[in-house]
Image (tube, grey):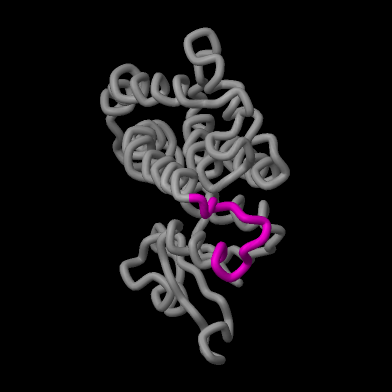
Amino acid sequence: MIVYGSTISPFVRKVMAFAAEKGLALTIEAAGLGRGGPEFLESSPFGKIPGFRDPGADGGKDFCISDSTAICAYLEAKYPEPNMIPVAPIAHARTIWFEEYADSIFFASAAKIFVHRLLYPKMLKRPFDEAIAANAVDVELPPLFDYLEGVIPPSGFLVEDRITLADIAVCSPFVNLAHTEMVIDPARWPKTAGYVSAILARPSFAPIVAAERAMVAALG
């Protein structure tokens, strides 16, 4: 199975960590930011990453789909064990909510920091606006961190006291913040800081994060 994109994207990273927790090995092919060819566009008609291909899965034809949520749902349905999206109604709903919180609410703010402190100035050599990043740090993110601080259970897992898609989705964007040298204030958000550190230290995340750090460090 092939994932098109780069793990510097929190959504690609989410898919790769999700698959790793399920014991699945996916191959990454570079795409996005002008990269990728016809096979990538077949998997993602609008050029968004990640794209995904499961060779021969659709009656002998390749199955292609895009969007990290759709990809994770496909992998969960095809490889139901270990279960990463709970089936009990309340736990299932909470998992979907936390993924939405991560993808649409949290990363909408985190992206402003990543784009204007790393992507534009260091990776793409484009003009950037530090004021946008600073506002996200000072105004937008604190209420989102306050929310997490109030909902993280003693177990250190958001749903069913075990690793699920909820934890993977929520923690993935924190890697992008770390690449900008932004850290979670452990005095203000101690539970959040410990929770994120523990999830990102898991074998599903740690090698991905280490490789990305080396890439970011090489940018200078």
> Left or right: where does residue 25 sit relative to residue 48?
right
Q: Quadrant of the C terminus?
A: top right
Quarter-of-image position of residue 97? top left
Residue closest to the eye, 118 or 96: 96
42 up-or-down from 99: above or below: below
Question: Could you tell me which residue is drawn at 34 percent across and 21 percent down?
Answer: 143
Residue closest to the eye, 89 or 83: 89
Q: Quadrant of the N terminus?
A: bottom right
Residue closest to the eye, 68 or 149: 149
> Left or right: where does residue 28 sit relative to residue 128?
right
In the rendered image, residue 108, in percent from the top left (x then y), is placed at 32, 39
- Count of numbered circles on the image: 0
Magenta span main SS = loop
Question: Could you tell me which residue is drawn at 40 percent across and 57 percent down?
Answer: 33
* Bounds of the magenta segment: 75-88
38 up-or-down from 168: above or below: below
> Is 85 contained in the magenta span?
yes
Quarter-of-image position of residue 45? bottom left
In the rendered image, residue 124, in percent from the top left (x then y), is placed at 40, 46
> Is 126 contained in the magenta span?
no
Question: Could you tell me which residue is drawn at 51 percent across and 50 percent down?
Answer: 88
Q: Residue furthest top?
A: 187
Question: Could you tell me which residue is drawn at 37 percent across and 39 percent down?
Answer: 101
In the rendered image, residue 74, in percent from the top left (x then y), is placed at 51, 67
Q: Residue furthest bottom?
A: 60
In the rendered image, residue 142, in percent from the top left (x then y), is placed at 36, 19
> Left or right: where does residue 172 sit relative to residue 217?
left
Residue closest to the eye, 1 or 86: 86
